[in-house]
């Protein structure tokens, strides 16, 4: 089974809001959450350490995600009303990751340097064979939505803390237009362009997920840094309807031109416009995910620009993922679907880890 990199998991948010312990298996988490409000609020769990080992998920991007109070539920303990609170919550999430890795270094490890990245990649050259042979899962920090950043100059401090990836917006209202915004024609403002410039100067890569179509294209074209990518979305052309949360063919082409990567979310309502949140999940299979993979490959002319950013446990769970998936371990089933479409082992290795690995080696060049 190929090694797999997942470019988007809200692990710290889940740990702090829902008290999820990712050292547990998915089965253990589901059993503990049975008859609690958690499955209704965030879906049945899809991620656990055992499943990461079984699925060869050895490196993940762990987000720093906090909720703007304007869109947060009353039970959400990671919501902010002002920028000082946002900073406090971001630091709490960093501390949660550090505690997880410090308490269980045989299970999880922080990746903040090229040497640490190389160590994780070296470990996973030998596949895990749970429970007989296991490896620590590497966690790379990414800030999902910087709307709460008190000052742009704080990026220098965050870079020193090991932050290498950042998506400027989640809900919008600062820097540029977001996919959830009311006015979808809004692009970047002056502060937004200043943010992109400073990100490039300090060496933080740009994630264009959650931007509206106008902002996404502006960001791809303007960002003066080396690495720009989309961590977690899907293809609007395949989806079957217009939705600002997805990427257009025009932006795919622009990312390919910059050697970027499109990370796909294996959530049914991202893959097909005719899937409703209350529809039976067996309405959608991994062939739909493969349709999006294939579309990016056809647009790019190769398998070098598409990968996975699952967003599993990020506001959805078991009930809205393709019918073959019971947990993150089952992403390996995508390999056979792609083989049946003519993708060879090298192509699949690129999609599962090689493309993200190429970008990460650029990001951690120093």
Image: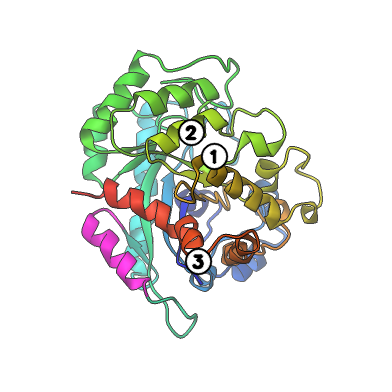
Q: How far from the left and from the top, in percent, is residue 263? A: 50, 46
- Residues rendered magenta in the picture: 111-125
Is 76 magenta? The answer is: no
Residue 112 is inside the magenta segment = yes
Residue 299, which numbered label? Answer: 1
Q: Earlier in the sequence, mark 2 or mark 1?
A: 2
Image mark for residue 253? 2
- Classify mark 2: residues with Cα within 10 Å, few (<14), some (14-19) or many (20+): some
Indicate the position of residue 286 as horizontal and vertical percent values.
68, 57
**Where does label 3 land, which residue?**
345
Query: How many numbered circles does the render carry?
Result: 3
Secondary structure, mark 2, is: helix
| Residue 273 in the image, given as x and y percentages of width and height | 74, 37
Which label number is shown at residue 332?
Answer: none
As helix, strand or loop, the secondary structure at mark 1 comes to helix
Where 92 sits versus 54, above or below?
A: above
Which badge, 3 or 2, is on the more N-terminal residue?
A: 2
- As rendered, which of 99 and 213 lies closer to the eye? 213
Mark 1 or mark 3, which is nearer the start of the sequence?
A: 1
Residue furthest toward the left? 366
Tell which of 18 and 161 is nearer to you.
161
| 126, 50: nearer the viewer | 126
Q: Is residue 8 something that shows in the picture?
A: yes
Q: Are marks 2 and 1 in contact (CB under 8 Å)?
A: yes
- Looking at the rendering, which quadrant does residue 160 occupy? top left
């Amino acid at each position: 089974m190929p090694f797999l990199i997942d470019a988007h998991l809200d692990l710290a948010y889940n740990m702090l809001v829902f008290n999820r312990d990712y050292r547990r298996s998915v089965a253990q988490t589901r059993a503990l959450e049975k008859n609690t409000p958690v499955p209704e609020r965030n879906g049945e769990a899809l991620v656990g350490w055992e499943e990461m080992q079984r699925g060869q998920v050895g490196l993940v991007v762990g987000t720093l995600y906090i909720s703007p109070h304007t869109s947060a539920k009353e039970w959400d303990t990671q919501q902010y009303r002002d920028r000082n609170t946002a900073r406090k919550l971001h630091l709490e999430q960093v501390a949660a990751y550090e505690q997880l890795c410090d308490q269980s270094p045989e299970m999880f490890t922080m990746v903040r340097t090229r040497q640490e990245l190389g160590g994780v990649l070296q470990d996973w050259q030998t596949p895990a064979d749970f429970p007989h042979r296991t490896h620590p899962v590497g966690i790379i920090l990414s800030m999902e939505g910087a709307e709460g950043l008190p000052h742009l100059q704080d990026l220098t401090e965050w870079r020193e803390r090991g932050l290498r990836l950042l998506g400027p917006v989640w809900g919008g209202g600062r820097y540029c237009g977001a996919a959830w915004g009311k006015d979808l024609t809004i692009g970047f403002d002056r502060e937004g362009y200043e943010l992109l410039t400073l990100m490039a100067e300090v060496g933080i890569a740009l994630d264009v997920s959650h931007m509206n179509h106008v902002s996404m294209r502006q960001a791809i074209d303007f960002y003066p840094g080396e690495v720009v990518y989309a961590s977690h979305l899907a293809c609007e052309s395949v989806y079957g309807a217009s939705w600002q949360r997805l990427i257009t063919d025009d932006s795919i082409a622009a990312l390919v031109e910059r050697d970027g990567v499109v990370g796909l979310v294996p959530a049914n309502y991202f893959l097909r416009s005719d899937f409703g949140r209350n529809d039976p999940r067996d309405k959608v299979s991994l062939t739909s995910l493969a349709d999006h993979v294939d579309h990016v490959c056809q647009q790019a002319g190769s398998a070098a620009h598409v990968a996975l950013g699952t967003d599993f446990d990020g506001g959805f769970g078991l009930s809205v993922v393709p019918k073959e998936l019971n947990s993150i371990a089952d992403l390996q089933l995508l390999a056979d679907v792609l083989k049946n479409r003519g993708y060879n082992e090298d192509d699949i290795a690129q999609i599962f880890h090689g493309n993200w690995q190429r970008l990460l080696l650029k990001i951690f060049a120093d």
